Image: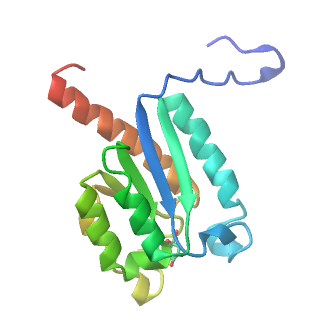
Amino acid sequence: MKPRPGGARAAKPARPPTLSILVLSGPNLQLLGTREPEIYGRETLADVHARLEARGAELGARVTARQSNHEGELCDWIGGARGERDAMLLNAAAYTHTSLALFDAIKAVALPCVEVHISNPEAREAFRQSSRIAPACVAKVSGFGVESYVLALEGIVRWLRARASLKTGKR
Ligand code: DQA
């Protein structure tokens, strides 16, 4: 690629959105940026959502990102995704370790879901080392800071496109 004047990198052209991805974050993640920054970093959830929307636009995926402190509301959003979205990214936060309701909700909609964590729960306290939702998910990305969300988005877009090309036989 030819370098642009001033050394600025060309923004990747947006692809028309062909995929729709729901990104959900659970309790206390509205506090990102100030919550235990040594674990969760300094970026706010609004920063993360903006990055996901921008990366989604480059990849041809419309991203809708929401946060709730309430298990039932997260279940409502997952339930509403059936037939509306192609996949979900879910950082269920503390509900990861406790919520049968979220496990059931993911199973019920039968949409591919990626479990996301900013930290690496397996390397933390014992109570974080089991996930109730993992068996309902196709993949997990954790430990990369807020980059985990972006990596999960890139991964699920590739996963969805690979699945589609397997079905059509087209590459
Ligand atoms: C978290 C890890 C969980 O154990 C914790 O309860 C959170 C955040 C993460 O993103 O690293 O709230 O999901």
Q: Residue at point 55% right, 57% down?
A: 66
Is 20 situated left or right of 108 in this image?
Answer: right
User: Which quadrant would residue 166 be assigned to in this image?
Assistant: top left
**Could you tell me which quadrant the C terminus lies in?**
top left
**Could you tell me which quadrant the N terminus lies in?**
top right
Q: Residue at point 45% right, 50% down?
A: 22
User: Which quadrant would residue 154 be assigned to in this image?
Assistant: top left
- Image spot of residue 160 (x, y percent): 31, 38
Q: Reply above or below: 165 against 154.
A: above
Residue lying furthest right = 6
Q: Residue at point 49% right, 22% down?
A: 16
* Foreground of the two, 84 or 142: 84
Residue lying furthest top = 2
Is 15 situated left or right of 79 in this image?
Answer: right
User: Which quadrant would residue 7 be assigned to in this image?
Assistant: top right
- Image spot of residue 24 (x, y percent): 49, 59
Is 114 situated left or right of 2 in this image?
Answer: left
- Image spot of residue 112 (x, y percent): 29, 51
Q: Residue at point 68% right, 21% down?
A: 10
